[in-house]
Every structure is written in structure tokens, then in C-alpha cells.
Image (tube, coloured by chain):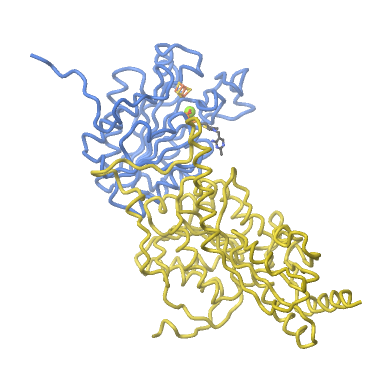
């Protein structure tokens, strides 16, 4: 008897090709999003807001309506979409440069307003798209294109622990940090994202999920080493867990 | 109808009321003098109407929310002044590229920098030629009375949706702050069908997905898009040019001015006419696209001099010069940084020019 091992999500465009480097964490997370859209059966009700970063081309992967935003402003674009179409499912998919560096003001205020949207923030501790410069999330001593001697916190400040900070916003309903890098972490991430999706569908309010993710190319690591780096280092600095959940 | 009744209204409030009447469903804004009353008024009126009002964290947020609402085919507006409009430029370029409709009210104050809060026309260039990136253009409408502020608010929403583009309603601090009798008449475009169901985002249910994005990396894609968008703007130029001409038929001197300055200039023109001076006025209402041909065609052999008058150091001047195209001399009179020009000063200049023509 034949056994179904893998089925491509209906949400993906037929024969789509990711624009990512091999082993890039973006692909895993977008895959989870596609599965969840299938599971909740919301493909025809979803408006995705893309952001500026390696994941900018959402419209090339997903069979979804997509509106693009300038760097850091997708929470605002999503606010405009959701307020004008409150019955649609609206999510932003952003990088750490986008949501936590240039756009952290917008991220916080969207959380404070308690917009009923879902933000997925891929934290790969650098500006991937522009070639691996330091972002607000780069780890202490991390070597990047703009911290060639390692991030010296005495000169450049400390990394932003965004999930902890967003959790202090009274308007936020659900704030969590998860990671991709092992099958266990992947499963946990899917559970957390499912909750973040469910919240919006239940009109619970703003959900923010920070996903620690790999950028093998700019980290100068193989995909396997990059995943190990997430498990052994990145997720030690950035604690995983649910920081706020008003539904529990 | 009570609609047609004349009431005394402050300019900012008139714009806000017209926005409600135009069917604006969402207002997003951040306060700045001299236009804060628009947001203050709408903070109550929009809620009473069951519409959306958000006091934003910045002008960046405000204009990007306009993009979000506009992308679903919803009428949305923001308003600001000078340095606030400066913050919106990246998004205005994106709106043009993404073909998202939206209205931006800009009530100019003195600049550069924080400048002052006096009335000014120092943001003609900012509105018409922008600080956003790329080959983009914006429709810019310039009222000179409060009634016209109302009518052009309607027109702003109409053109934004007819052509799916950003429209700037450009007023100066005088127009925002002064009071005048006017009527909040019916929006003449109420029944216009903008076909939003053909392009707006509402979820790809039983149809192909749509996208409104601004990164176009495929070979030749962006070049083609630029040509297509430019073609649309040429269409706008063909159909939507608006201007006022006053006593230009036999004129030896033509004054060019926009907004409140045009109004002041009109008074000076009337006074000069009483003295027998053959002077007329050309007032562009669409500052962008600029009515170049219309102005150019006015310059016949009678016309000896065009006098451009602005509350700045000569920003519209280059559009006036290129329209006149060397057919006669162009002089400039202006004041920057919130300096106000009165009709006596313009009259004096007209007399002076006239004496020189005659001698
Ligand atoms: C206003 C503006 N500044 C800078 C850029 C250049 N830029 C493009 S992507 C990017 C960083 C993206 O990093 P991140 O959000 O972390 O996404 P990643 O590529 O790492 O997934 C920058 C700085 C831009 N597009 N717009
Ligand atoms: S640069 Fe990094 S984030 Fe971007 S696609 Fe490559 S691996 Fe992924
Ligand atoms: Mg990144």
C-alpha cells in the first residue's frame, strides 16, 4: 500500500522556487505558514504583508494576496489592511533588521494598539539581504560585515531582546520566541505559530512570534553547523518560550 | 438642502468635513501645526460615523497605514505639514509604484528645517518633485479659497481612485487657519465606479492571487513598469489639468501665482486694471501635472512680461519659465520663511513693471 509521506501545501504556487540560499531558515518557516493556512483553510481570506529582507518575494511563493511594505513599515501597512478589512486574516513576515532595527517603533506601537494581526519575525542576527551586516540582534562578539572585530557591546550596544520587550506592551495578546534548527524546535515553532494564527481568528489580538533562524551564507557556516549554532548559541542568548499569553 | 447652506468654516475643518463627505473611511495622522485641527476634528467625527481614526506614532506610520487601507480599495487619508510630509516621501514613491490610491493633505509651514509655523509655499518642490526615489510623479492640487479646498478634497479622492495613485492636496497655513463662508456640498463623484473589485486585495478566493508590491527584479520588468506608469501620468495630464485665468486676453503683463498668493494677486490685478494697466492672472490648480501648454499658449505678442509671485524663493518659477519657453521675460517676486506678500506690494511691482514696458 502506498503511504503519503509528503504533500506540498495547497498554499504554495505550483513549481515555485525559493530564492533562498541552501539551508536558509526562511524556507522552514514559510513552509509552516503554508501548512497552517491549509489547516485553517484561510487561503482565500488572507492578505499577507511582505517586508524588505531576503523573504521579500512572498508573492512568488504563496497563492495569497500580498501587499509590500517599505523597510520596517509592514506593521503599519498591516494595520491599514486589517482596520479596513477586519474579517481578513492579516500577517506580516519580517526579518530582525526590518521588525527590530529600522522598524522597532512600529512593531511596539502595533503591539500597544493591540492590532488583531499576526507578526512573524525571523531573527537571523543580521541583515541577510544586504550581505550580512550587523543588526540590532547581532550577538555580542558576533562577526559581521560591519562588526569585523566582533560586536563590541561597549561601543555598539547590546542585542535587542525583542520578545521580552514586546511582552511588556499591554496591547499584546501573545508573545513567544521559538527557533528552527532541529526537528524538535521545528515542531515547537509550528505549535507556537498555530497559536498565533488561532488568536487572530478568535479575535484575541496582537500576536508576535520571534523565530530564531539560520543564515548559513552570512554566518559563514554549513547549513548543519548553522543549525547547531542556533541550538548551542543563539537560543542560549535569546531564551525560547512564551513570554505572554492572555488566553492561558 | 442643508447641504448647500453657507456656513463659516476654518480651512482645516472644511477639509476634514469634505473628507467625511467624500467617503473617507480611514484617517491616520500625527499632529503638526498648522494642520492639527484636521486630525482633531476627525478624531471625533470619524468615530461618530463608525469609521477608522488612528493617532499614529509618526508620519511614517500614518502614510504606511494609508497604503494598507488603500491596498484593499478603501478610501484613506493622512494630513501633515512640511517636515512631516518629508518623512512620508519614501512611501509616496512606493504608492506610485504599487499603484495604491490615497490622499495626503499638506498644509505648508515655513522652512527649511523645523522652520516656523507661519504660512508658506516653501513645499511646492516637495509636493511636485518630491524627495522620494525614482521616476515617480504625484498629482498635486492647489486650492486658493476654502470652498475650493472642499471641492479639491473631493477631487483628490476621485483622482486617487480613478488613477490608483497618491494625490497631494497642497494648502498653505493661511488656507488652513482662516475662516470663510462655504458650503459642504455633495461629493460630485459619489456615483463614480472605480472598479476596485478588479484590483483591490481582499483574499484570493476563487481567483488568481493579486499583489501590490514595489520590488521588481526581473530583467526589464521595472523598465516596463516605469513606461506604463508614465503613460498613465500622460493620460492624467491629458484629462485632468485644471487652472484659472483672469483678465489675460489683452494683457501686457501676466502674473502667475498659486494658492492664497493667487488670491492676493487677483486683488492687485483688479486695482491695476482700474488704473488702466493691462494685467491678468494665471493660476494653476493642478500644480502637478503643471498646465504648461495652457500657460504657454497665453503668451502671445501682447504679453511683454510674466511676473511669478510665490511665498518662497521661486519654486514654481522653473515650471513657469519652461512653459513660457523664452517667448517673453519672466520676473520673480517672493518671500521665503513664512514672509507674507500683500496686494499693495504686488500692485507696486505691477506699476513698476508697467512703467518700464511703456518707457
Ligand atoms: C529604507 C531602507 N534602508 C535600507 C534598505 C536596504 N536593506 C534591504 S534588506 C535590509 C536588511 C534586511 O534584514 P532583515 O530584516 O534582518 O532580513 P533578512 O534578509 O536578514 O531576512 C536592508 C538594510 C532598504 N531596502 N530600505
Ligand atoms: S542571505 Fe541568509 S537569510 Fe538570506 S537567503 Fe541566504 S541564508 Fe537566507
Ligand atoms: Mg535578518
Q: Taking B38 as reference, is B291 left or right?
A: right
Find the residue positioned furthest to the left: A1
The spot of residue B143 in percent (x, y) is: 59, 70
The spot of residue A152 in percent (x, y) is: 61, 23
Q: Identify the image quadrant of the C terminus of chain B.
A: bottom right
The spot of residue B281 in percent (x, y) is: 70, 74
Q: Identify the image quadrant of the N terminus of chain B.
A: bottom left
The spot of residue A170 in percent (x, y) is: 39, 47
Relative to B56, does residue B358 appear above or below in the rendering?
below
Relative to B172, does residue A151 appear above or below in the rendering?
above
Chain B painted colour: yellow
Which residue occupies 59% across, 22% down?
A151
Which residue occupies 42% across, 23% down?
A20
Chain A painted colour: blue
Which residue occupies 37% across, 34% down?
A209
Pick whichever, A209 or B273, lies toward us.
B273
Amino acid at each position: 500500500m502506498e503511504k503519503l509521506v509528503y504533500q506540498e501545501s495547497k498554499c504554495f504556487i505550483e513549481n515555485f522556487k525559493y530564492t533562498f540560499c541552501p539551508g536558509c531558515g526562511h524556507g522552514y518557516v514559510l513552509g509552516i505558514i503554508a501548512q497552517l493556512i491549509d489547516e485553517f483553510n484561510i487561503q482565500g481570506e488572507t492578505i499577507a504583508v511582505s517586508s524588505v529582507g531576503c523573504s521579500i518575494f512572498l508573492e512568488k511563493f504563496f497563492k495569497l494576496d500580498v501587499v509590500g511594505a517599505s523597510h520596517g513599515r509592514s506593521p503599519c501597512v498591516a494595520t491599514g489592511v486589517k482596520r479596513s478589512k477586519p474579517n481578513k486574516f492579516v500577517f506580516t513576515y519580517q526579518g530582525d533588521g526590518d521588525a527590530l532595527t529600522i522598524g522597532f517603533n512600529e512593531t511596539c506601537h502595533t503591539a500597544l494598539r493591540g492590532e488583531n494581526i499576526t507578526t512573524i519575525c525571523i531573527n537571523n542576527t543580521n541583515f541577510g539581504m544586504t550581505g550580512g551586516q550587523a543588526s540590532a540582534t547581532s550577538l555580542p562578539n558576533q562577526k559581521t560585515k560591519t562588526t569585523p572585530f566582533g560586536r563590541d557591546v561597549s561601543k555598539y550596544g547590546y542585542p535587542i531582546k525583542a520578545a521580552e520587550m514586546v511582552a511588556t506592551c499591554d496591547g499584546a495578546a501573545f508573545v513567544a520566541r521559538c527557533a528552527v534548527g532541529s526537528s524538535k524546535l521545528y515542531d515547537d515553532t509550528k505549535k507556537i505559530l498555530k497559536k498565533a494564527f488561532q488568536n487572530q481568528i478568535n479575535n484575541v489580538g496582537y500576536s508576535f512570534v520571534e523565530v530564531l533562524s539560520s543564515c548559513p551564507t552570512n554566518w559563514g557556516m554549513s547549513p548543519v553547523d548553522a543549525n547547531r549554532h542556533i541550538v548551542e548559541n543563539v537560543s542560549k542568548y535569546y531564551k525560547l518560550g512564551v513570554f505572554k499569553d492572555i488566553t492561558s | 438642502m442643508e447641504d448647500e447652506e453657507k456656513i463659516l468654516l476654518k480651512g482645516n475643518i472644511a477639509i476634514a468635513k469634505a473628507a467625511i463627505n467624500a467617503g473617507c473611511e480611514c484617517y491616520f495622522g500625527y499632529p503638526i501645526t498648522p494642520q492639527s485641527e484636521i486630525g482633531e476634528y476627525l478624531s471625533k467625527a470619524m468615530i461618530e460615523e463608525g469609521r477608522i481614526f488612528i493617532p499614529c506614532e509618526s508620519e511614517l506610520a500614518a502614510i504606511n497605514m494609508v497604503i494598507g487601507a488603500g491596498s484593499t480599495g478603501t478610501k484613506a487619508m493622512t494630513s501633515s505639514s512640511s517636515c512631516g510630509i518629508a518623512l512620508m516621501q519614501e512611501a509616496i514613491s512606493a504608492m506610485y509604484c504599487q499603484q495604491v490610491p490615497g490622499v495626503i493633505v499638506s498644509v505648508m509651514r515655513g522652512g527649511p528645517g523645523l522652520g516656523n509655523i507661519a504660512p508658506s509655499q516653501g513645499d511646492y518642490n516637495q509636493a511636485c518633485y518630491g524627495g522620494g526615489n525614482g521616476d515617480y510623479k504625484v498629482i498635486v492640487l492647489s486650492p486658493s479659497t476654502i470652498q475650493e479646498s472642499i471641492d479639491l478634497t473631493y477631487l483628490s479622492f476621485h483622482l486617487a481612485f480613478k488613477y490608483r495613485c497618491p494625490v497631494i492636496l497642497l494648502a498653505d497655513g493661511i488656507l488652513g487657519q482662516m475662516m470663510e463662508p462655504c458650503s459642504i456640498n455633495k461629493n460630485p463623484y459619489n456615483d463614480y465606479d472605480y472598479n476596485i473589485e478588479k484590483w483591490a486585495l481582499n483574499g484570493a478566493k476563487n481567483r488568481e492571487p493579486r499583489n501590490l508590491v514595489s520590488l521588481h527584479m526581473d530583467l526589464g520588468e521595472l523598465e516596463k513598469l516605469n513606461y506604463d506608469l508614465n503613460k498613465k501620468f500622460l493620460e492624467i495630464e491629458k484629462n485632468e489639468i485644471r487652472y484659472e485665468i483672469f483678465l489675460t486676453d489683452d494683457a501686457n503683463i501676466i502674473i502667475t501665482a498659486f494658492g492664497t498668493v493667487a488670491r492676493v494677486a487677483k486683488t492687485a490685478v483688479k486695482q491695476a486694471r482700474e488704473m488702466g494697466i493691462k494685467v491678468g492672472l494665471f493660476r494653476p490648480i493642478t500644480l502637478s501635472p503643471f498646465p504648461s501648454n495652457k500657460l504657454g499658449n497665453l503668451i502671445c505678442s501682447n504679453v511683454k512680461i510674466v511676473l511669478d509671485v510665490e511665498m518662497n524663493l521661486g519654486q514654481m518659477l522653473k515650471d513657469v519659465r519652461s512653459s513660457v519657453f523664452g517667448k517673453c521675460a519672466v520676473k520673480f517676486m517672493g518671500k521665503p520663511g513664512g514672509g507674507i506678500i500683500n496686494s499693495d506690494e504686488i500692485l507696486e511691482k505691477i506699476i513698476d513693471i508697467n512703467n518700464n514696458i511703456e518707457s
